[in-house]
Each structure stands twice: as C-alpha cells, then as structure tokens.
Image: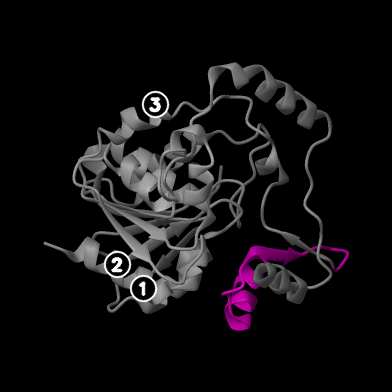
Amino acid sequence: MAHRLVEWGPDDGRPLVLLHGWMDCAMSFQFVVDAFDRDRRVLAPDLRGFGESDWQPQGYWFPDYLADVDALLDRVSPDASVDLAGHSLGGNVALLYAGLRPARVRRVVSLDGFGVPDEPADSAPDRIVAWLDALRAPPALAPYASVEDVAVRLRRNNRRLSAERAGFLARHWARRRDDGAFELLADPRHKLPFPTVHRFDQTLAVWRRITAPTLWVAARDSAIPRWLRAHPEGEAAVDGIELVSRRMAAIAGARLAVVEDAGHMVHHDQPQAVARLVESFVDAR
C-alpha cells in the first residue's frame, strides 16, 4: 500500500510527525507549519484511504493506522525517537502508538482527540447488524460542481474558516473527475459503521504505558468533549473539559491546554496558538 508523505523543513534532525483527522489530509497542517517560529523537520502522511494515499478495499480498522505509523517511523527515524502529534483521529492514533511503542516517541501531542466513549457489550448485536446492512448498500460521497463549492462546504462546516484558508484546503481535499465534477479525496468506506464494540478500558490500558511527556490540546468550543459528556461516563461531569481532565489521569504527567475561540478544527481556527503550544512543548528541555 502506497502512502503520500508531505515534508516540510530540513531533511535532517528529529522529525515532528503529524497525523491528520478523519476525512482530512496531511496538508491540513499547512497553517500550523507556517506559524512555527523556526524552520523544523515536519512530516505528515495522508492516512490510508485519505488524500493521495491508497484506498483499502477490505475496509478500515483502527490497528492498521498504528501499523502504518510503525512502518513510517521505521523509514524516517529508525534509530531515534520522534515527536508525534495528531488531530482528532490522528491524536487518538498518536496516543495509542505512544503507549504501544513508548521507546519510539519522545513527546506526544493530541489536538482535540481524547479517545471515544465506552460502549456496552450488549450493543454488539446491533453494531454487527448495522455493519451487515451497510455492506448491502455501501456509502458514497456526493460530488461537487466545482472546487469553489468544496470551499463553501468547508466554511459551512466551520464558521471560523476564512475564505482564503477554505480555498487552500479545498484544492487539497478534492480532485477533478473525468466528467468535470469534483470528488473528495477519501474512500467512502470510511463511513461504514464498525461491527466491533469499543471498550474504553482497553484504551486506558494502553494509555497507562505512555512514558513520553504528553500534551492534550482542547478547543474551548469543540463538540468532542460535549460528545463524550453525552455518554454515561460523563453524566456527573460539570462540563466536557472536566471529563477530558479526568481521562488525562490515565497518563502520568499529562498536561492540558485549552485554546479559546476555537472549535474541533482547532488547527484551522487558531493555527498560531496551536503552533506555539506544540513548538514550546516539543522544544522544552
């Protein structure tokens, strides 16, 4: 399977590896890279089935992302640990990888990625049935008439996104088809429901093995903490940020930074603030 890898900065030195979120691509980090105070080696892959990386006909399973990071680090930094950061899906991959391969990660940052809610075991039958039903009618992604329409959609999803940034992202988020329409650079099979039940205690078991200094970055206006709070484990929480803080307790020494005036796409909404947080954290002695 071929993966696209975007590279910024010099060819040598310890890399900062960035992992994008669901339905996104590596170029999503351009605004943060532009905001760094100094030129540094930054690497960001298009995760499998996104951007210009190959699609996976058998579907997508979370452990595959971990295997892809493992293979990437074997290639770009076989003899030294890396600084690893990710947004949303990528943040969750980064945290899990840091627990599974602690010697390979020097510092880890998760941008608005805090794990997913626990699911009860008795939900398993319904999850499997939903997956089987979806296989009969596979999901599809609607085309767009123009790349400008893609940018409009991005701004509709995120009111903080400027027209200039939306136009930049749209050119990397979609491609022109032979019929002239534009399609998103993402495999529709990412929208298939998982037939498995997520058990958060398994995630905690991995997080407890993290030895790298860990930074969680939460966006004040993100729906993710509120989504976590909507599940039983969050009922007693005062707000979503408090629940995030409680989850952090599983990672020794983890610290939390909250970015104001930002939603879930925090690296688009406040790239300067994210750049300062990431850079000061990975450069700390």
Label 1: which secondary element = helix
Residue located farthest toward the left when viewing the structure as drawn = 285
Q: Is residue 128 above or below residue 10?
A: above
Question: Is 170 inside the magenta-drawn segment?
Answer: yes
Give amino acid for label 3.
Answer: Gln
Residue located farthest toward the right when viewing the structure as drawn = 179
Q: Is residue 4 visible?
A: no
Mark 3 and mark 2 residues within 8 Å of each other at the beta carbon: no
95 on left or right of 53: left
Q: Is residue 50 above or below residue 260?
A: above
Q: What is the magenta range?
A: 157-180
Q: Which mark is residue 110?
A: none
Q: Which residue is mark 3?
A: 202
Alpha carbon distance from label 3 to label 1:
32 Å
Label 3: which secondary element = helix
Alpha carbon distance from label 2 to label 1:
6 Å
Give amino acid for label 2.
Answer: Leu
Q: Residues within 10 Å of mark 3 (few under 14, many from 20)?
A: few
Residue at the (88%, 64%) spot, across then down: 179
244 on left or right of 163: left
Residue at the (84%, 63%) spot, across then down: 178
Q: Which residue is mark 1?
A: 273
Position of residue 17 measured from the top left corner of the image (x, y, whole percent):
36, 56
Give amino acid for label 1.
Answer: Ala
- Label 3 vs 2, first from the N-terminus: 3
Mark 2 and mark 1 residues within 8 Å of each other at the beta carbon: yes
Question: Is 18 inside the magenta-drawn segment?
Answer: no
Q: Which mark is residue 277?
A: 2
